[in-house]
């Protein structure tokens, strides 16, 4: 059995399948049953470090269209943030194989202000949860988790004085983005207050009125410390539309609950900048050289216990915000996984991973900019990148692997990189042969062409019969590794240097015999055999053509010492079922089970006779692995009314057809040499009788085969 390949994330590629071959019949197990919905989606996070300037997490989901097309239904990506027992409302988007405009999406998750640390230099770790499922709703059981770091406010935020009465108070408006906003973006404004009063002027609350321009929308207002400040918001009616924030102070140290001394943040405001609002005349009157004005009014309310008897007067100020066109803030290369196994070294065929480049703007737009990007590999002798960024690849010319190879991506003035680990086969690779000594087979001759000496230019040839020799199966086994840059230690893809991958199907066209007069290499479907011709020795070699390198070899010997066929095992195979399931406690490992149906359960059901030869040197060979011109297989039914036989072309295989539900039907099977080298009435090389299993109306699948030996 073999596999077309399985990714390191446990997701089979689009064409992956398990292929079994029995007597020339192929049994294919598609891997759809283990293909999880998340295998059809590539997900990347724009940034895992979040500041108050952009108080949101952007998650980009891109469909792997080849897999999504096989699933043939839309998938839903759902994400949310969690901190301890608190969670945000889940956000979702749908990727569809039927609509090219819905094959990528951006999920923008706003981080609650209460989760941000306010002490300078502190950080808060939260968790981003996301999953992919066929339905939207709650997060699916197959969850992915990513740590997100929230930063505290920076002391370098640009400030604007809403009120300053030195040395008693200082009320500031802080902007992490220097009072410049991109259209359609989200940003934060913070209110910071320093106060050192006395008994005469103890404040109980601060009232702030704001006249927001129509370009701005206030999404939320959050108290910086709910234990000390309560924020009440009230909207005024048109036409003089403004909002009033009443910041009520609650003392944690004094009994009267009035503001005596304070230094810190009062509240955070989440502002949404609209793309375009209002009429043209309205825009012209409120935008001055791309500046937008916002008016503020601040008034303090004195505690009833204060000795101050005067009236506090409101103070009005105007702030200006600069509005820019929306711009790209993140460049995201999207590839499926972070590992590339260099199979090109053995196959000679390019192995590539598709790549797409997406840009994310401040305003929340997602764009495919692959065709406008440029890519370059930092280690072109290990990993190559197409200049247009459409894929990264290896072509077999590489001489080593490497962990975390950087591929640089450029788009306009932005640059980023991704890291890909390239796994390389450990050399020399293992060439395994089922029988390194191939003997002549007693009483079995095959026909060959013999060249005859001639005086004429054209040589003559005739049929001749020689002893048949045994043949052996070849398997190419390899392990893939990378070297640790710091320790020099080798890290193996299989997890263990002694666990090897069967890469026979990859090296199929690069396995050679050093002496084709003694033995030749014969590929058959996904397997390779070495067939002996005459006594001698040779080496079976795996060799690359460009560059010319021997990756591994092993010797074989062909000898005249004869062995005999001791047993012919016959099994009737009506059907083979393949199944695959996840290996317990191993996320990306699976167990493939084979169930063979030997019993014929209904009229006109067919079954193939599978024949295996056992030799006196304990070697075994399946008959269909032998070249068809080397043998003839004959069979007779003890009851042709119950079981009919259908001989294949030139007597190379036999098929049963059940006609009646009868017990004790025997099939006599005999093996002969080719007709050119045996008389019609000559003795068979070996013969056996096989009892056919017939039981109508009952289907039996067993994992053990029923074999009759003589």
Image (tube, rainbow, N blue to C red):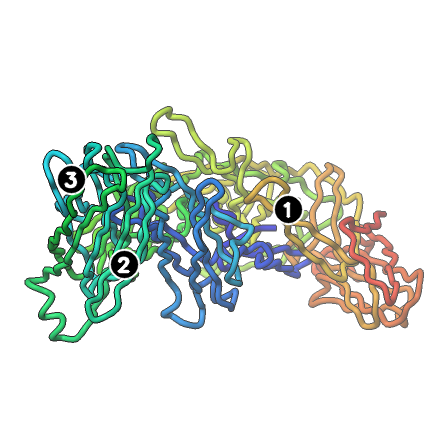
Q: Is residue 413 above or below residue 620?
A: below
Disc with the residue nearer the chain's start (3 vs 1): 3
**Labelled disc at residue 135:** none
Label 2: how many Cα within 10 Å (few below 14, some 14–19, many 20+): some
Residue 382 at least partly seen:
no
Residue with the most extreme top position = 487
Label 3: how many Cα within 10 Å (few below 14, some 14–19, many 20+): some
523 displayed left or right of 99: right
432 displayed left or right of 118: right
Point 73% across, 37% down: residue: 618
Number of callouts: 3
Q: Is residue 2 above or below residue 75?
A: above
User: Could you tell me how far apart the alpha carbons at marks 2 and 1 are, in whole angstroms?
Assistant: 56 Å
Q: Is residue 516 above or below residue 90?
A: above
Nearer the camera: disc 3 or disc 1: 3
**In the depicted view, which residue is nearer to us: 250 or 589?**
250
User: Could you tell me how far apart the alpha carbons at marks 3 and 1 are, in whole angstroms?
Assistant: 69 Å
Q: Quadrant of residue 664?
A: bottom right
**Labelled disc at residue 218:** 2
Which element carries disc 3, helix, strand or loop?
A: strand
Residue tagged by mark 1? 591
Point 20% across, 32% down: residue: 198
Residue tagged by mark 3? 170
Give x and y (percent) for residue 60.
Answer: 36, 55
Disc with the residue nearer the chain's start (2 vs 1): 2
Give x and y (percent) for residue 452.
Answer: 55, 55
User: Could you tell me how far apart the alpha carbons at marks 2 and 3 are, in whole angstroms?
Assistant: 24 Å
Disc 2 vs disc 1: Cβ atoms closer than 8 Å?
no
Label 1: how many Cα within 10 Å (few below 14, some 14–19, many 20+): few
Q: Is residue 389 above or below residue 123?
A: below
């Amino acid at each position: 059995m073999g596999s077309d390949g399985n990714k390191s994330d446990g997701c089979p590629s689009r064409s992956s399948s398990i292929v079994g071959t029995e007597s020339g019949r192929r049994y294919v197990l598609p891997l759809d049953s283990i293909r999880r919905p998340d295998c059809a989606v590539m997900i990347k996070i724009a940034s895992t470090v979040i500041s108050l300037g952009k108080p949101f997490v952007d998650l980009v989901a891109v469909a792997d269209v080849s897999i999504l097309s096989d699933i043939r239904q839309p998938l839903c990506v759902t994400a949310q943030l969690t901190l301890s027992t608190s969670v945000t409302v889940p956000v979702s988007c749908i990727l569809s194989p039927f609509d090219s405009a819905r094959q990528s999406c951006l999920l923008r998750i706003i981080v609650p202000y209460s989760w941000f640390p306010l002490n300078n230099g502190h950080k808060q770790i939260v968790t981003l949860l996301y999953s992919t499922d066929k339905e939207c709703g709650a997060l699916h059981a197959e969850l992915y988790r990513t740590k997100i770091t929230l930063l505290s406010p920076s002391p370098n935020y640009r400030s604007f004085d809403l009120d300053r009465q030195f040395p008693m108070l200082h009320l500031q408006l802080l902007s992490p983005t220097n009072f410049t906003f991109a259209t359609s973006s989200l940003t934060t404004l913070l209110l910071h207050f320093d106060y050192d009063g006395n008994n005469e002027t103890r404040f109980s609350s601060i009232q702030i009125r704001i006249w927001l321009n129509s370009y701005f929308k206030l999404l939320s207002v959050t108290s910086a410390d709910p234990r000390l400040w309560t924020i009440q918001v009230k909207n005024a009616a048109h036409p003089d539309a403004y909002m009033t924030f009443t910041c009520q102070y609650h003392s944690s140290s004094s009994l009267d609950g009035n503001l005596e001394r304070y230094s810190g943040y009062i509240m955070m405001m989440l502002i949404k900048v609209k793309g375009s609002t209002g009429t043209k005349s309205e825009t012209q009157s409120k935008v001055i050289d791309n500046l937008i004005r916002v008016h503020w009014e601040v008034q303090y309310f004195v505690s009833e216990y204060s000795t101050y008897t005067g009236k506090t007067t409101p103070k009005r100020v105007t702030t200006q915000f600069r509005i820019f066109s929306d711009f790209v803030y993140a460049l995201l290369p999207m590839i499926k996984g972070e590992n590339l196994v260099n199979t090109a070294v053995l196959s000679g065929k390019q192995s590539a991973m598709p790549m797409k480049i997406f840009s994310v703007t401040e305003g929340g737009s997602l764009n495919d900019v692959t065709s406008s990007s440029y890519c370059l590999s930092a280690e072109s002798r290990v990993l190559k990148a197409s200049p247009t960024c459409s894929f990264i690849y290896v072509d077999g010319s590489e001489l080593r692997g490497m962990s975390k190879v950087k591929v640089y991506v450029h788009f306009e003035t932005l640059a980023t990189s991704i890291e890909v680990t390239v796994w390389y086969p450990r050399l020399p690779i293992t060439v395994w042969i089922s029988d390194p000594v191939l003997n002549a087979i007693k009483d079995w001759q095959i026909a060959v062409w013999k060249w005859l000496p001639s005086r004429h230019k054209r040589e003559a040839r005739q049929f001749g019969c020689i002893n048949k020799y045994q043949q052996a199966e070849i398997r190419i086994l390899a392990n893939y590794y990378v070297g640790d840059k710091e320790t020099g230690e080798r890290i193996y893809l299989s997890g263990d240097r002694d666990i090897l991958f069967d890469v026979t199907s990859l090296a199929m066209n690069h396995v050679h015999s050093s002496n084709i007069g003694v033995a030749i290499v014969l590929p058959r479907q996904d397997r390779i055999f070495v067939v002996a011709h005459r006594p001698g020795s040779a080496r079976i070699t795996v060799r690359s053509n460009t560059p010319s390198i021997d990756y591994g070899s092993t010797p074989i010997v062909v000898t005249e010492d004869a062995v005999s066929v001791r047993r012919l095992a016959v099994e009737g195979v009506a059907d083979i079922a393949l199944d695959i399931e996840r290996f317990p406690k191993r996320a990306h490992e699976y167990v493939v089970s084979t169930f063979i149906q030997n019993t014929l359960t209904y009229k006109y059901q067919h079954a193939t006779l599978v024949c295996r030869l056992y030799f006196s040197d304990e070697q075994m060979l399946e008959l269909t692995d032998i070249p068809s011109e080397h043998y003839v297989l004959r069979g007779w039914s003890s009851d042709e009314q119950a079981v009919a036989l259908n001989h294949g072309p030139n007597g190379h295989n036999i098929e049963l057809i059940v006609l009646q539900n009868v017990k004790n039907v025997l099939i006599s099977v005999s093996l002969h040499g080719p007709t050119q080298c045996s008389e019609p009435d000559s003795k068979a090389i070996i013969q056996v009788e096989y009892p056919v299993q017939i039981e109508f109306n009952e289907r039996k699948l067993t994992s053990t085969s029923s074999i009759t030996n003589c």
